[in-house]
Image (cartoon, rainbow, N blue to C red):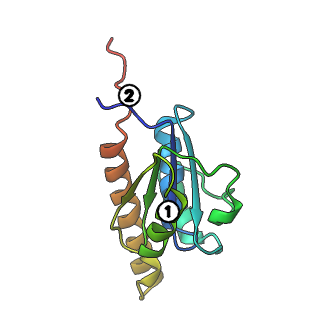
């Protein structure tokens, strides 16, 4: 198993859906094994549908407060995962003079889906499930001890 990074930052446009969901999922899977944070290029408002679909799987996102790159207390991370072109550009600017890896993960923005509440929730669930899959693959959880 590859060594896990010590610190990970997830970044998207407004820190309202994709990056906070990814942050919460990674923290849920790894606890305090690594430092995890999330930001947006612009400050948005936490999307209640993101809170709802994570709550369905036992992850509490309700206390997340969106923030921007400028509000980061520490600008050094081992890895930054971006979800939008503008966040990727901003991450590359931030890491220009550091040894930080930057990865772009192409994932859908569920806020663009129109339709009934249930159709919109399905888009958020699809994002949640995709993030779970990608995060488990990129940051494998430790093996359970064998009995």
From the top left corner, tell me how far across and down residue 32 is, in percent.
Answer: 57, 33
Q: Quadrant of residue 110?
A: bottom left
Secondary structure found at label 1: helix
Mark 1, other Cα within 10 Å: few <14 / some 14–19 / many ≥20: many
Q: Quadrant of residue 81?
A: bottom left
- Image quarter where the C terminus lies is top left
Which of the pair 111/66 is nearer the observer? 66
Which of the pair 78/12 is nearer the observer? 78
Mark 2 vs mark 1: give the one in front: 1
Give the Cα separation between the discs numbered 2 and 1: 28 Å
Which residue is under mark 2?
142
Q: Quadrant of residue 145?
A: top left
The answer, for residue 101, to whether it is visible in the render is yes
In the rendered view, would you say 110 is above or below 114? above
In the rendered view, would you say 87 is above or below 132? below
The answer, for residue 66, to whether it is visible in the render is no
- Image quarter where the N terminus lies is top left
Secondary structure found at label 2: loop
Residue shown at 58% from the left, 68% from the top: 40
Which residue is under mark 1?
91
From the top left corner, tell me how far across and down residue 39 is, in percent.
Answer: 59, 62
Which of the pair 35/130 is nearer the observer? 35
Q: Is residue 67 left or right of residue 83?
A: right
């Amino acid at each position: 198993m590859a060594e896990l990074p010590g610190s990970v930052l997830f970044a998207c446009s407004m820190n309202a859906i994709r990056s906070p969901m990814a942050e919460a999922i990674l923290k849920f899977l790894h606890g305090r094994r690594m430092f995890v944070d999330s930001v947006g290029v612009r400050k948005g408002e936490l999307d209640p549908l993101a809170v709802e679909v994570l709550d369905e799987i036992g992850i509490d996102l309700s206390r997340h407060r969106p923030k921007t790159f400028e509000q980061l207390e520490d600008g050094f991370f081992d890895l930054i995962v971006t979800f939008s072109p503008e966040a990727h550009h901003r991450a590359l600017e931030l890491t220009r003079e550091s040894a930080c890896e930057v990865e772009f993960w192409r994932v859908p923005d569920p806020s663009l889906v129109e339709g009934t509440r249930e159709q919109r929730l399905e888009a958020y669930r699809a994002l949640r499930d995709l993030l779970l899959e990608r995060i488990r693959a990129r940051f494998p959880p430790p093996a359970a001890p064998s009995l």
